[in-house]
Image (cartoon, grey):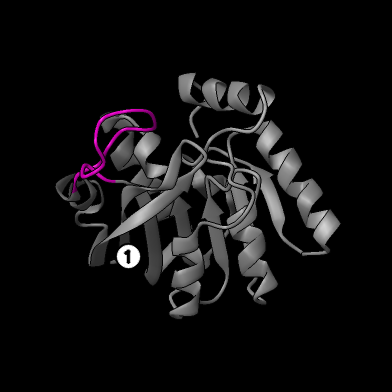
Amino acid sequence: MAEDGPRRDFEAAYAAGTPPWDIGRPQPEIVKLAAEGGVKGMVLDVGCGTGENALYLASLGRRVVGVDGSPAAIARAREKAAERGLPVAFHLADALDLRKLHLRVETVIDCGLFHVFSDEERRPYAESLTEVLSPGATLHVLCFSDQEPPGPGPRRVSEYELRAAFRSLFALVRIRPALFESLAHPGGAKAWLATLVRI
């Protein structure tokens, strides 16, 4: 993520304790996606936080790389990987400049990152993802939905905004209502789970 306010905010949230998005287990929507066969080949978990989704996918035998802009989150993710004996590579990286990874994967998981970007950052983010995804590769985005009432948590995202951010770079294959679990939203906040394919 960019070296600006949001990154500092995330680092402060980790320093203060357990952030609301760090639920200590994989997001149920990611578990379901994997069970449906939606996660193929090598996987990049972008905005991986402390690594629960990446580690879960690795436990299923997937090759996984996790990246995040928070040094505290990456340090914790590496500790978890060592504790669990799972071979996940976690790197500090800017999601708006993924070409520096020199990596190509078949699947990208974005679980709670897209909705933190400003309007101006959304298109550069989509372009950055093309640096790690070849044509035909898959992107899954789980983000807060505009169906979630106003209140705590990140920006709400409309279906139109999702389509617009990725238009001409990705084809939207599926978008469905989903839930995003957090410590601040018992039972889950209303979300979108979008599946897109790199054009």
The answer to whether residue 102 is magenta is no
* Residue type marked 1: Thr
Q: Is residue 188 left or right of residue 74?
A: left
Q: For the stretch drawn in magenta, what is the main secondary structure?
A: loop
Q: Residue furthest front?
A: 186
- The residue positioned 30% from the left and 64% from the top of the image is 196
Q: Is residue 100 above or below residue 132?
A: above
Q: Residue furthest left?
A: 160
- Asked if residue 39 shows in the view, the reply is no
Label 1 crowd (10 A; few <14 / some 14-19 / many >=20): many
Q: Nearer the viewer, residue 112 or 107?
A: 112
Q: Is residue 6 visible?
A: yes
- Among the 4 quarters of the image, the one containing residue 119: top left
Relative to 69, is 108 above or below? below
Measured as percent of width and height from the top left, residue 41 is found at 54, 76
Q: Nearer the viewer, residue 149 or 170?
A: 149
Residue in the image at 50% along x and 73% along y = 34
Q: Nearer the viewer, residue 147 or 69?
A: 147
* Quadrant in which the C terminus appears: bottom left
Residue range in magenta is 145-158
The answer to which of 140 and 125 lies nearer the viewer is 140
* Residue displayed at 66% across by 38% down: 73
- Residue at left 37%, top 33%? 154
Asked if the stretch drawn in magenta spans residue 155, the answer is yes
Rendered image quadrant of residue 158: top left
Q: Is residue 188 above or below residue 61?
A: above
Is residue 120 left or right of 104 when viewed as pictured? left
How far from the left and from the top, in percent, is residue 149?
24, 36
Q: To which residue does mark 1 refer?
A: 195
How many marks the image carries: the answer is 1
**On screen, residue 14 above or below 67:** above
Q: Secondary structure at mark 1?
A: strand
